Amino acid sequence: MSSITLKERLNRGETAVGTFQALPSAAVSEMAGLAGLDFVIIDQEHGPLTATDSLPLCAAAQHGGSSPIVRVRENSMPEIQRALDIGAEGVQIPQIETQADAEAAVKAARFNPVGERGLSPYVRAGGYDGSETYTEDQNESVLVSIHIEGQNGLDNIEDILSVDGIDLIFIGPYDLSQSLGIPGQVTDQRVEQTMTEICELAQEAGKIVGTYADSAEVASQWIEVGVQYVAVSVDVSFLKRRFAQLADSIAN
């Protein structure tokens, strides 16, 4: 695993490509890195994964050479603290709608003096016994990503972008399409135009921009407009499509 963190790479202007993981399989986490992906988003929001499931997935992703990011179930201090304590290199926090929501996310993800994350050195993130620079190192290296995906978040986007300690704005196209009254139509011009406007505002505010793409082609489209962090598809979708291709090729 590179000694340069994902956050450092993004701050240098590099592009990072990863995927979402819903399966409780350390092999999947490791293979993603071995295949060359930069990060794996361990998805606790849309799926059955727990903190207990996620710890070995974080370790396996790092062993394979990718950065484990945990998407937590909700914007709460226990959820965020637990995800970071098990060794995630970052958190994705869904449904951020106000400046206060964004401030709460920072408070939960950063140690004093930046935030109020609870401190125990006896966790995987601290090497199980901590160090003199543990809290400082975590504040420096942890990637804090918040989701903008609803109308309230859109209405308050400039206030949200003003919050210090937020590294990355992740645009959720599916929830965004739903908030615009066209659920699932993520390639609709209205969705794409709104996403482009968020990208421009976030870049002006000095925030990294991320999003989800169903395919490599869609990922390339968003990279061209300045999105640096792109999650392409989900492990279960990759598998199902490959199984379907196999079944179809044999049947025909």
Image: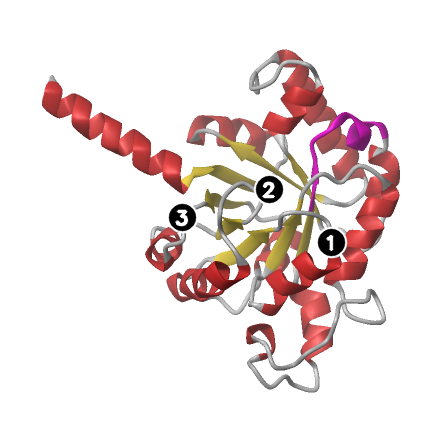
Residue 23 tag number: 3
Q: Which residue is mark 2?
A: 228
For label 2, the SS is loop
For label 3, the SS is loop
In the displayed structure, 183 sits above or below 21; it is above
Image quadrant assignment for residue 119: bottom right
For label 1, the SS is loop
Q: Nearer the viewer, residue 46 or 13?
A: 46
Q: Which residue is mark 1?
A: 76
Asked if the stretch drawn in magenta spans residue 32, the answer is: no
Image quadrant assignment for residue 110: bottom right
In the displayed structure, 219 sits above or below 2; it is above
Q: Earlier in the sequence, mark 3 or mark 1?
A: 3
User: Which residue lies at the image location 71% right of the left edge and 32% below the top edge?
Assistant: 199
Crowding around mark 2 (Cα neighbors within 10 Å: few <14, some 14 to 19, many 20+) is many
Q: Which amino acid type corresponds to the residue marked 3 in the rendered image?
A: Leu
